[in-house]
Amino acid sequence: IVRQLKSKGIGIIITDHNVRETLGVCDRAYILNEGNLLESGTPEEIARSPKAKKIYLGDGFRLDEGQWIKKEERKGSGKESPGPLFE
């Protein structure tokens, strides 16, 4: 469903505690705590972020490349998504 929406240029916001699933379908992710933005970035940036690991993911968190949408697939129209979570 997310891929179909993206192909039509429709963005969506996903709120979820399943980090692996969410990072697997988004262009950008945001980690919030009590309404405060703690970290943001691409799935790759979030998965590698020392701050995100310390605050939310845990030191042992790993996300293999095969678990997220490749950059080439995310670009779609050739533009990176600047905002909400897109697949």
Image (tube, grey):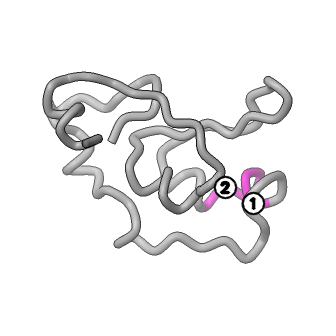
Q: Main secondary structure of the magenta part?
A: helix
Label 1: how many residues lie within 10 Å, few (<14), some (14-19) or many (20+)?
A: some
Label of residue 40 in the image: none
Do tag 1 and tag 2 residues touch (Cβ < 8 Å)? yes
Which x, y percent locates residue 71? 29, 51
> Hey, what amino acid is under mark 2?
Ser
Q: Disc 1 residue type?
A: Lys
Tell me which residue sits at (58%, 60%) in the image. 47
The C terminus sits in image quarter: top left
Report the front residue among 30 and 48.
30
Specify the quadrant of the image occupied by residue 33. Answer: top right
Could you say whether the residue bearing mark 2 is in a helix, strand or loop? loop
Residue denoted by label 2: 49
Mark 1 or 2, which is nearer the eye?
1
Q: Is residue 60 left or right of residue 81?
A: right
Determine which residue is flagged by label 1: 53
Name the spot of residue 30 as percent of width and height, x first. 61, 36
In the rendered structure, the answer to whether residue 61 lies left or right of residue 55 reads left
The span picked out in magenta is 48-53
